[in-house]
Image: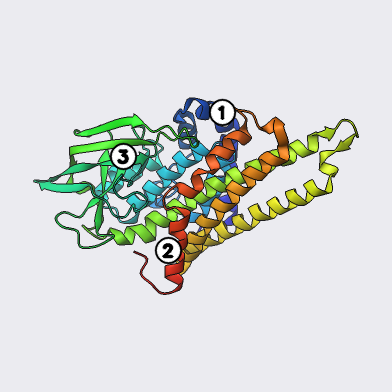
C-alpha cells in the first residue's frame, strides 16, 4: 500500500497539474462538451497515467486509496476530467489484474509511459445498469475473435487507444457474470463510433456508443480465462470503478462547499452592514455540510484502504461509499446553491456546473439502488448476482 509520504507527493503533483492546466479550462470543457485532451496530456506528462501499472513495468503500482485521492483533487476543478482519468485508471486496473506477457508489453508499459489511454466499454441498451449481463457476442475465427454488439456510454469514446469490452463467453452463457473481457484497439476494422451522447452534466467525458460489427480482435487480447469475469466484476471492476467515481463526486461536493463558504465570507447585507458569515443560521448550515463531506470522505478512504489490504469485507464499505457519496454530493450542491442565493442561479458558473455534474452520481451504473441492494444481499449472506 502507498506510504503517506508518497501519497502526499503524488497528490501535490496532481494538485499542481489541476491548478495550472485543468481548472482554467474546466468551463470550456463543460460549455463545449469537449473531451479534455489537455487534462489527459498533462496527467500523462505528470506520470500518473500508470497509477495502477505494476512498478516492474514502469508504473506507480498503486491501488484504491491513491485513486480516491487523485480523482477528488481533479473533481474539485473539472468533473469531466476526473471521470476521464478515473475510467482510464479502471481500465488499467482490469488489464493489470491478469495480464499475459504480451499484454504487459503492448498495453501496460505504454500506459506507464503516458503513451496510451484505455477505458471501459461495458454498458448496453438491453442490460442497462446490469453491466455484468452483456449481449455482445464472440465468434472464433482462427487466431481471432469476431465481435458483434453495441456498447453505450463509453467514457473517452473515440479518444482512447484501447477499450476493455465485455462480451458473452464464447458459445452459450450459463448464468450472470459468465462473460469475457477483451481489449479492442481504437481503429479496429468493424468498429464504428456513433453520435456523441449529450448529457446535462459530465459533458466533456466523450460518452459515446460504439457498434462492433464483426470487429476482428486477436485472441491474444482476451483478458483472463474465458468465462471467469465474475471475478473481475467484484474484485476489480466494481471496486476500482466505484472508488474512482466516489473520489470525483467527493471533489464536486467539496468544490460546492468551498464556493458557498467563499460567497458567505465575501458578501454582506448592505442595509444593515451584517456579513453573511456572521448569520447564525448560515453558520449552522455550513457546519452541517462540512460534516457531511468529511464523513463521506472518511468512508471512501476507509473503503479504499480495506480494498488495498485485501480485506474480504472491503466490498461492503465500497458499496456503501458509492451510495453515500451520491447522497452527499447532490445534497451539498443543492444546499450550496441555496446559500449563495440568486447570484448563483445563473448559467455558466462553477456551482451551476457542479449541480448538473452531481446529479449523475445516482444514475451512473452501478446506480445507488443497485449498490444498496448488493450491500443488503451481502450482509444477509445472499448471492450478489
Label 2: few (<14), some (14–19) or many (≥20) C-alpha neighbours in 10 Å: many
Q: Which secondary structure lies at badge 2?
A: helix
**Residue 209 vertical position relative to residue 10 in the rendered view, above or below:** above
Label 1: few (<14), some (14–19) or many (≥20) C-alpha neighbours in 10 Å: some
Q: Looking at the picture, tell me which residue is in the foreground, 276 or 243.
A: 276
Where is residue 145 shown, x and y percent of the image?
15, 45
Q: Which secondary structure lies at badge 1?
A: helix
Could you tell which of marks 1 and 2 lies nearer the N-terminus? Answer: 1
Where is residue 41 shown, x and y percent of the image?
46, 32
Could you tell which of marks 2 and 3 lies nearer the N-terminus? Answer: 3
C-alpha separation, residue under disc 2 versus residue under disc 3 = 30 Å
Label ID, residue 374: 2
- Which residue shows up at 60% across the image and 28% down it? 347
C-alpha separation, residue under disc 1 versus residue under disc 2 = 36 Å
- Which residue shows up at 49% across the image and 35% down it? 200
**Which picture quadrant has residue 341?**
top right
Label ID, residue 162: 3
Where is residue 192 shown, x and y percent of the image?
25, 32
Label 3: few (<14), some (14–19) or many (≥20) C-alpha neighbours in 10 Å: many
Mark 1 lies on residue:
27
Foreground disc of the pair 2, 3: 2
Label ID, residue 292: none
Quadrant of the image containing the C terminus: bottom left
**In this rendering, does residue 312 appear at all?**
no
- Which residue shows up at 49% across the image and 44% down it? 360
Where is residue 130 shown, x and y percent of the image?
34, 54
Amino acid at each position: 500500500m502507498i506510504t503517506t509520504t508518497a501519497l502526499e507527493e503524488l497528490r501535490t503533483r496532481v494538485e499542481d497539474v489541476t491548478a495550472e492546466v485543468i481548472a482554467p479550462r474546466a468551463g470550456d470543457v463543460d460549455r463545449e462538451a469537449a473531451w479534455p485532451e489537455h487534462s489527459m496530456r498533462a496527467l500523462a506528462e505528470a506520470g500518473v497515467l500508470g497509477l495502477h501499472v505494476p512498478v516492474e513495468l514502469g508504473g506507480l503500482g498503486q491501488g484504491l486509496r491513491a485513486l480516491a485521492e487523485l480523482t477528488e483533487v481533479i473533481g474539485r476543478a473539472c468533473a469531466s476530467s476526473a471521470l476521464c482519468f478515473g475510467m482510464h485508471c479502471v481500465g488499467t486496473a482490469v488489464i493489470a489484474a491478469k495480464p499475459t506477457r504480451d499484454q504487459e508489453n503492448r498495453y501496460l508499459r505504454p500506459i506507464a509511459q503516458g503513451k496510451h489511454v484505455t477505458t471501459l466499454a461495458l454498458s448496453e441498451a438491453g442490460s442497462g445498469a446490469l453491466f455484468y449481463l452483456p449481449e455482445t457476442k464472440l465468434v472464433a475465427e482462427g487466431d481471432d475473435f469476431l465481435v458483434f454488439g453495441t456498447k453505450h456510454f463509453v467514457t473517452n469514446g473515440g479518444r482512447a487507444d484501447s477499450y476493455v469490452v465485455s462480451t458473452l463467453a464464447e458459445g452459450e452463457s450459463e448464468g450472470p457474470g459468465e462473460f469475457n473481457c477483451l481489449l479492442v484497439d481504437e481503429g479496429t476494422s468493424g468498429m464504428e463510433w456513433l453520435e456523441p451522447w449529450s448529457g446535462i452534466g459530465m459533458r466533456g467525458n466523450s460518452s459515446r456508443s460504439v457498434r462492433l460489427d464483426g470487429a476482428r480482435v486477436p485472441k491474444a487480447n482476451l483478458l483472463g480465462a474465458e468465462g471467469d469475469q465474475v471475478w473481475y466484476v467484484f474484485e476489480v471492476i466494481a471496486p476500482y470503478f466505484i472508488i474512482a467515481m466516489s473520489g470525483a463526486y467527493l471533489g464536486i461536493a467539496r468544490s460546492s462547499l468551498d464556493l458557498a463558504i467563499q460567497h458567505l465570507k465575501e458578501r454582506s447585507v448592505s442595509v444593515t452592514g451584517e456579513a453573511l458569515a456572521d448569520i447564525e443560521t448560515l453558520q449552522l448550515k455550513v457546519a452541517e455540510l462540512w460534516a457531511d463531506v468529511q464523513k463521506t470522505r472518511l468512508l471512501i478512504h476507509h473503503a479504499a484502504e480495506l480494498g488495498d489490504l485485501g480485506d474480504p469485507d472491503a466490498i461492503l464499505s465500497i458499496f456503501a461509499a458509492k451510495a453515500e457519496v451520491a447522497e452527499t454530493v447532490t445534497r451539498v450542491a443543492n444546499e450550496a446553491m441555496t446559500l449563495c442565493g440568486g447570484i448563483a442561479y445563473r448559467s455558466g458558473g462553477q456551482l451551476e456546473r457542479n449541480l448538473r455534474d452531481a446529479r449523475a452520481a445516482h444514475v451512473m451504473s452501478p446506480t445507488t439502488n443497485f449498490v444498496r441492494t448488493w450491500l443488503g444481499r451481502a450482509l444477509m449472506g445472499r448471492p450478489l448476482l
